[in-house]
């Protein structure tokens, strides 16, 4: 596992974004872990988060693209932070774009916020986490409506590695199958377990035998094949 992935796992724990315990998800599933990207709230956190995303995007998609699209609302700060980091790390100025929830009919009119998307643009989509693919269902037609646009792929922070809405495939696999572009994550839950299981971090074992057993049981029921 690359060092930046190990650092990102520890960063999620340190920021209290990745938590372990008992959580009820929107789907109704009882999960032993939960990720809340809304807890990245200060400048140093967003600075580091943008760097981790930029490194993962560069690893999977290179730098030959024009637009980083972050769906409203959480995708807006993710896109901005990552564009800044991409410029700093790789010397490439990527434009950010997001969608509005409602079309603006005065001033800076339209459905888009940030850079316009034009024919020939190559786009990478950025999100926090994808459990159902609903956000992509909403944003994919918006991006495609802008013209002859090539979507290179999707980048999320954590692959939960659980069944999506249709069968035994993960949400990321369902997106790849439905839309025809790759979907990747900075890290997967398998990476998280590998790095944290029975290892002390900041004076505490984050994933002990009890939590590991709960995660294993969860994946027995909800794990993607």
Image (cartoon, rainbow, N blue to C red):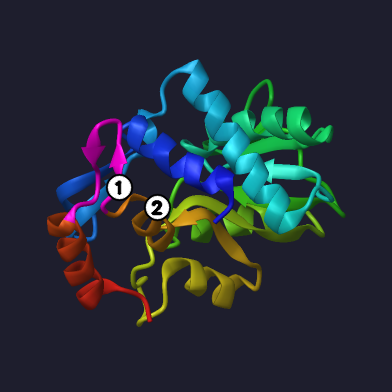
Q: Determine whether label 2 and label 1 are within 8 Å by CB.
A: yes
Q: CA distance from mark 2 to mark 1?
A: 8 Å
Question: Is 183 situated above or below 19?
Answer: below
Name the residue furthest right.
120
**Quadrant assignment for the C terminus:** bottom left
Where on the picture, by quarter, is residue 159? bottom left
Q: Is residue 186 left or right of residue 9?
A: right
Secondary structure of the residue carrying tag 1 is loop
Please state the horizontal and vertical placement of residue 208, each as a whole percent of the image. 19, 52
Label 1: few (<14), some (14–19) or many (≥20) C-alpha neighbours in 10 Å: some
Name the residue at 61% across, 29% down: 81
Where on the picture, by quarter, is residue 37? top left
Name the residue at 57% across, 43% down: 4
Question: Is 103 situated above or below 126?
Answer: above
**Is residue 104 among the parts visible in the rendering?**
no
Q: Nearer the viewer, residue 58 or 25?
A: 58
**Quadrant assignment for the N terminus:** bottom right
Question: In terms of secondary structure, what is the magenta stretch mainly?
Answer: loop
Name the residue at 49% across, 66% down: 172
In the picture of the structure, the residue carrying the numbered disc 2 is 195
Residue 104 lies in the magenta-colored region? no
Q: Which residues are magenta?
A: 198-208
Label 2: few (<14), some (14–19) or many (≥20) C-alpha neighbours in 10 Å: some
Name the residue at 59% across, 51% down: 2
Residue 199: give its label: 1
């Amino acid at each position: 596992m690359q060092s930046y992935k190990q650092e990102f796992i520890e960063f999620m724990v340190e920021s209290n974004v990745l938590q372990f315990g008992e959580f009820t998800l929107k789907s109704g599933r009882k999960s032993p872990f939960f990720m809340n990207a809304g807890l990245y709230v200060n400048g140093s956190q967003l600075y580091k988060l943008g760097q981790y995303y930029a490194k993962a995007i560069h690893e999977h998609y290179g730098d030959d693209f024009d637009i980083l699209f972050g769906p409203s609302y959480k995708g807006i700060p993710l896109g901005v932070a990552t564009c800044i980091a991409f410029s700093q790390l790789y010397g490439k100025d990527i434009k950010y774009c997001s969608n509005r929830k409602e079309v603006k009919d005065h001033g800076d009119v339209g459905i888009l916020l940030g850079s316009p998307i034009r024919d020939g643009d190559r786009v990478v989509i950025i999100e926090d986490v994808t459990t159902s693919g609903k956000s992509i269902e909403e944003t994919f037609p918006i991006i495609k409506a802008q013209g002859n646009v090539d979507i290179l792929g999707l980048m999320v922070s954590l692959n939960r590695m659980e069944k999506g809405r249709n069968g035994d495939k993960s949400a990321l696999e369902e997106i790849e199958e439905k839309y025809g572009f790759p979907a990747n994550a900075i890290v997967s839950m398998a990476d998280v377990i590998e790095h944290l299981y029975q290892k002390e971090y900041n004076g505490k074992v984050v994933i002990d035998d009890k939590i590991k057993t709960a995660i294993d049981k969860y994946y027995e029921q909800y794990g993607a094949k």
